[in-house]
């Protein structure tokens, strides 16, 4: 029975476990690094998706990428923050999931990534699949297993 429960879980799709796009903090192409740093600081996340107005996913922007862009030879050049658009600092080579991908695929990906962006059939951003979500589910299965 317990084995069956975990089998059922692993055969569910990513759509059942993702954080929906309207609850995901993001920045838009064209926003500058000052705005991105503000969003990251206010939300408390270390990295968030970069989208365009059509909700297509272009990359991820994180505090480390912003700092890397403004570190000069002798000092941190904060005055550059409002001159550089996010697309010049974001990471574009990022893992992606589809809403219909099996949970097991997502599980493998969050071993190396804190979260993975999810796209729908129209290649539009649908949400994110996070390490916390899958750990919560596994925690439930393991606790039931021990009952
Ligand atoms: P981090 O920002 O590095 O956060 C690492 C973990 O710290 C999160 O794991 C979560 O457990 C906790 N955490 C950080 N900030 C939080 C906050 N404001 N509220 C609640 N918990 C917070 P996960 O939840 O597995 O998230 C993994 C990564 O996914 C995060 O890494 C962040 O980059 C991204 N993320 C998660 N939720 C997001 C959201 N609603 N919008 C944008 N990005 C999100």
Image (cartoon, rainbow, N blue to C red):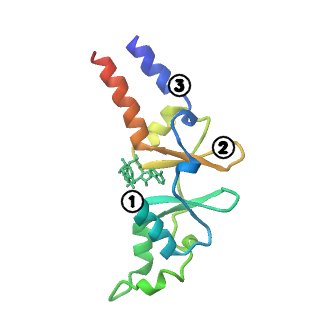
Please, is residue 109 above or below residue 42 in the view?
Answer: above
Crowd class of label 2 (few under 14; some 14 to 19; many from 20; radius 10 Å): some
Horizontally, residue 80 falls left or right of residue 27, namely left
Q: Nearer the viewer, residue 107 or 86?
A: 86
Image quadrant in which the C terminus is located? top left
* Residue behind label 3 places its C-beta within 8 angstroms of ligand 1: no
Please, is residue 3 above or below residue 43 in the view?
Answer: above
Residue that protrudes farthest toward the bottom in the picture = 74
Task: Please indicate, yes or no, whether residue 96 appears anywhere in the rendered image.
Answer: no
> Where is residue 103 shown, x and y percent of the image?
51, 33
Please, is residue 115 above or below residue 41 in the view?
Answer: above
Determine the image quadrant of residue 54.
bottom right
> Where is residue 102 shown, x and y percent of the image?
55, 32
- C-alpha separation, residue under disc 1 versus residue under disc 3: 32 Å
Q: Secondary structure at mark 2?
A: loop
Q: Nearer the viewer, residue 105 or 43?
A: 43
- C-alpha separation, residue under disc 2 versus residue under disc 3: 18 Å
* Residue behind label 1 places its C-beta within 8 angstroms of ligand 1: yes
| Residue 72 badge | none
Name the residue located 47 percent from the left edge and 84 percent from the top edge: 80
Q: Is there a contact, CB below 8 Å, between mark 1 and mark 2?
A: no
Name the residue located 44 percent from the left edge and 14 percent from the top edge: 4
The residue that mark 1 highlights is 44
Image quadrant in which the N terminus is located? top left
Q: Earlier in the sequence, mark 2 or mark 3?
A: 3
Task: Please indicate, yes or no, whether residue 126 appears anywhere in the rendered image.
Answer: yes
In this rendering, the count of numbered labels is: 3
Name the residue located 55 percent from the left edge and 36 percent from the top edge: 14
The residue that mark 3 highlights is 11
> Where is residue 34 shown, x and y percent of the image?
48, 76
The residue that mark 2 highlights is 120
- C-alpha separation, residue under disc 1 versus residue under disc 2: 27 Å
């Amino acid at each position: 029975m317990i084995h069956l429960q975990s089998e059922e879980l692993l055969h569910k799709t990513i759509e059942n476990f993702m954080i929906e796009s309207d609850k995901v903090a993001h920045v838009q192409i064209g926003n500058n690094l000052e705005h991105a740093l503000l969003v990251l600081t206010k939300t408390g996340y270390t990295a968030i998706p970069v989208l365009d107005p059509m909700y297509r996913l272009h990359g991820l922007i994180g505090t480390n990428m912003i700092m890397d862009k403004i570190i000069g030879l002798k000092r941190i050049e904060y005055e550059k923050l409002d001159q550089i658009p996010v697309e010049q600092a974001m990471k574009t080579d990022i893992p992606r999931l589809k809403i219909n991908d099996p949970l097991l695929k997502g599980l493998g990906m969050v071993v190396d990534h804190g979260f993975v962006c999810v796209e729908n059939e129209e290649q539009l951003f649908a949400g994110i699949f996070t390490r916390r979500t899958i750990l919560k589910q596994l925690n439930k299965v393991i606790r039931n297993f021990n009952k």
